[in-house]
Amino acid sequence: MTTGPLPRSQQGAEPQLLLTSLLGDFWYWRDEHIPSAALVRLLGEFDITPASARAAIRRLAARGLLTASRSGRTTAYGIPARTSEVIIERTHRMLTFGATAPDWDGRWTVVAFSVPEHDRGMRTTLRTQLRALRFSALYDGVWVSPHDLAESALSVLNELGIASATVFRATEVPGGGSSPVAAFDLGPLAKEYQRFAERYEPVLASLDDGLVSPAQALRIRTELRVDWRRFPETDPDLPAELLPGHWARDRAQKVFLQIYDRLGPLAELRFRQLLATTDPGLAALASHHDSKTVAALFAELGDRHPAGDTPFEQAAEARRLDEVRQS
């Protein structure tokens, strides 16, 4: 097959993240275990060496993110119990993020605190936790968010034992100086969204022309998912009233969703092909989901939402906080 101008592979995606993304896309709600040789072959599609792939598998198992079983000399791995619901909820959030801006009642959640300068560790921890909640600093010691996060902010302050703080909900007085929205510097985020759209838009043209192979589809869809997942964690998700005109997220979100949905069948084919080299029976069980089927699965969860105590959720939260620190 002749290939079109598809995005060049980006370096640096962690093997562990790639593997959990692959299983989250094509193997959730399955109890069967996949032989380690097949997982190594899957990661090989992303230029991960066998040694690095095996190390990633061992680390995921050690962290409780994979379960292991043995049959003779073959070791196989699967998704732990109670993880499927987590994957569905997080995938649904990933696929719906940015489709619409949240409603707003015009009020701000404000956190005003005073932590001694010598207690820098506590100040850093508090700021990281507030940033993870999508607060931003208006002034030193005054953090704001347009979302109703009073209870969440109080919970953070109580957990950290910070008593010299006040949390309240308030409206802005016109003409009162700097607007609270000034706390949010959207320029760098807009550039990230623009780069994302420019990187992946050529895929749509190649799909229209039938120039995407199954191997390319698997790689692009997985890398697309890995690249997009950062935005729901780092974007403050401001109400429409506070966003600039022609907000860059709109374009990027449309590109993401179209590619994710359209590449699904081809990517699933390649996943099956790779699995079939080790176990044809398992290959027949692989499947993919698009935004519509994920929405249906999410609706079926009803009240059975994750409690936040699985290794998958704990690892995701740790990764989210790490990304917030780096943002």
Image: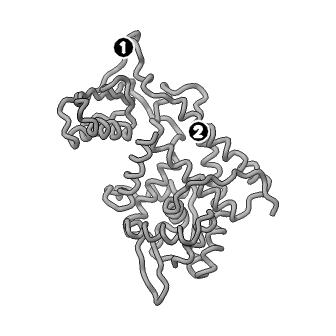
* Residue 131 as seen in the image, left or right of residue 100: left
2 or 1: mark nearer the eye: 2
Residue reaching furthest top? 175
Query: The N terminus lies in which quarter of the figure?
Result: bottom right
Residue at the spot 45% in from the left edge and 42% down from the top edge = 326
The local secondary structure at tag 1 comes to loop
> Residue flagged by tag 2: what amino acid is it?
Tyr
The local secondary structure at tag 2 comes to helix
User: Residue tagged by mark 1?
Assistant: 173
Most foreground residue, 292 or 17: 17
Residue at the spot 41% in from the left edge and 59% down from the top edge = 86
Residue 189 x, y percent position in the rendering: 53, 35
Mark 2 to mark 1 CA distance (whole Å): 32 Å
Most foreground residue, 135 or 256: 135
Residue 31 x, y percent position in the rendering: 45, 74
> Residue flagged by tag 1: what amino acid is it?
Val
Q: Residues within 10 Å of mark 2 (few under 14, many from 20)?
A: many
User: Residue tagged by mark 2?
Assistant: 193
Residue at the spot 22% in from the left edge and 41% down from the top edge = 160
Residue reaching furthest front? 118
